[in-house]
Image: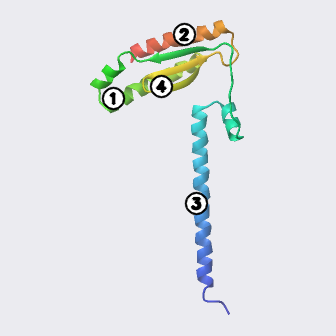
Amino acid sequence: WTPNWLAAAITLVVAMSLALSIAVAIIMINRREHLWLLKAMLPSKVISALRRGEDYCESFDNVTVLFSDVVSYTTIAATLEPVQIVRLLNKMYSAYDELVDECECYKVETIGDAFMAVCGTQGQDPVTAATKVARLAQAMIHATQAI
């Protein structure tokens, strides 16, 4: 003898197992994307501290900071279509990102037309850090003129 509800119960268990498997897969994919995004924005040591639930703060004795802003950005942006502005900034900041790596600096932030990078956070002496940032600034000027 088999109860009438057995086939329905087996179907329900299989369906729930499938739904649970899909949910776990989605969570794993989202975690991977979340970690990828964090790695794109923060240094590994900061991510590790945050994952442990710790606050992270670090100070440096000698750091050289570069702030960059597009001259006449508002005027330029007023003459372009939004997609053209996005393409221009993407092209410019993609070039800057490569230059930051070449000059052994660290990009801190990009907001609108503002760009910030630092050097000296890895223990370089102040003169070396300042020289690297100056070279980065010169390279950024040349790259911007080429765009």
Mark earlier in primary sequence (3, 2): 3
- Color scheme of the displayed model: rainbow
Mark earlier in primary sequence (4, 1): 1
| Residue 23 at x, y percent in the picture | 58, 59
Mark earlier in primary sequence (3, 1): 3
Residue 104 in the image: above or below residue 14? above
Q: CA distance from mark 4 to mark 1?
A: 15 Å
Q: Amino acid at mark 4?
A: Ser
User: Secondary structure under badge 2?
Assistant: helix
Q: Dots 3 and 1: beta carbons under 8 Å?
A: no
Q: Dots 1 and 2: beta carbons under 8 Å?
A: no
Number of numbered markers? 4
Counting other residues with Cα less than 10 Å from the Cα at mark 2, is it few (<14), some (14-19), or many (20 or more)? some
Q: CA distance from mark 2 to mark 4?
A: 17 Å
Q: Check disc 1 and report the residue beneath it.
A: 84
Q: Dots 3 and 4: beta carbons under 8 Å?
A: no
Q: Amino acid at mark 1?
A: Gln
Q: CA distance from mark 3 to mark 4?
A: 36 Å
In-image side of 50 versus 77 (left or right): right
Furthest-left residue in this view? 79
Q: CA distance from mark 1 to mark 2?
A: 29 Å
Q: Check disc 2 and report the residue beneath it.
A: 135
Mark earlier in primary sequence (3, 4): 3
Counting other residues with Cα less than 10 Å from the Cα at mark 1, is it few (<14), some (14-19), or many (20 or more)? few
Q: Check disc 3 and report the residue beneath it.
A: 22
Furthest-bottom residue in this view? 1
Q: Amino acid at mark 3?
A: Ile
Q: Give the residue displayed 49% in from the left and 9% down from the top.
A: 138
| Residue 137 at x, y percent in the picture | 51, 12
